[in-house]
Image (cartoon, helix red, strand yellow):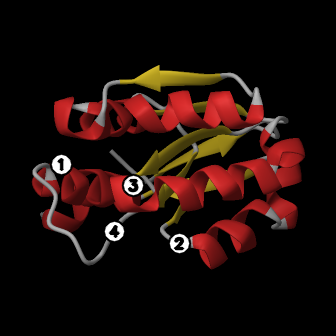
Amino acid sequence: MTDQTITMEKQKRIALVAHDNCKIDLINWAKNNKSQLGKHFLCGTGTTAKLITEATKLPVTALNSGPLGGDQQIGARIVEGDIDFIIFFWDPLSAQPHDPDVKALLRIAVLYDIPIANNLSSADFLLTSPLMEMEYKRKIIDYRERIK
């Protein structure tokens, strides 16, 4: 197998995730960026998806909460080609009961060349990038070849 190129369409499929201490920050960010987010398909983990929908009236498909497998659901969707982009406001100061799941999600995002914003400024930079308005070809490296 060789490296693969996958096209992200103009309308991105964005996962929204936030740890408990960061939910308010993500909700406020989503409210401030409602018009831009409204151009894309949104999903998110449990409570985060529900709260963003309530605050913005945008449709956000709710997956399980992070501790109940939501991070793994997002990871699986990345592997299946159903998520293009992640906004994940994570709490660097609090241990999470599902830290291994979070680490696995971050690893899968890098492995599949998924843009991921982990804080307010990176979310602002990514969402306002001109690349958000166009198709983008991301390159999936064939790590099996590299391992050989």
Q: Is residue 74 above or below residue 26?
A: above
Query: How far, Cα to Cα, is label 4 from label 3?
Result: 18 Å
Q: Quick one: 77 or 136, which is closer to the camera?
A: 77
The structure residue drawn at horizontal position 67% and vertical position 42%, both measured from the top left corner, is 7
Secondary structure at numbered mark 3: helix
- Asked whether 94 or 102 is in front, the reply is 94
Whether residue 82 is visible here, answered yes or no, is no
User: Which residue is tagged 3?
Assistant: 109
Is there a contact, CB below 8 Å, between mark 2 and mark 3?
no
Position of the C terminus, as image quadrant, is bottom left
Q: Could you tell me the amino acid type at mark 2?
A: Asn
Q: Which residue is mark 4?
A: 91
Q: Residue 29 sits in which quadrant?
A: bottom right
Q: Residue at x 71, y 39 (%)?
A: 12
| Label 4 or label 3, whichever comes before in sequence order | 4
Mark 1 or mark 3: whose residue is earlier in sequence: 1
**Badge nearest the viewer, 4 or 3:** 4
Q: Is residue 71 visible?
A: yes
Distance in Å between CA atoms under marks 1 and 3: 12 Å
Residue under circle 2? Answer: 119
Q: Which residue is mark 1?
A: 101
**Image position of 126 (left or right of 119):** right
Indicate the amino acid at tag 3: Ala
**Camera-nearest residue between 67 and 51:** 51
Task: Residue 36: give x, y in percent of width and height.
Answer: 85, 47
Disc 4 secondary structure class: loop
Q: Secondary structure at mark 1?
A: helix
Give the class, few, some or many, for how many residues have Cα within 10 Å of label 1's Cα (few <14, many ≥20).
many
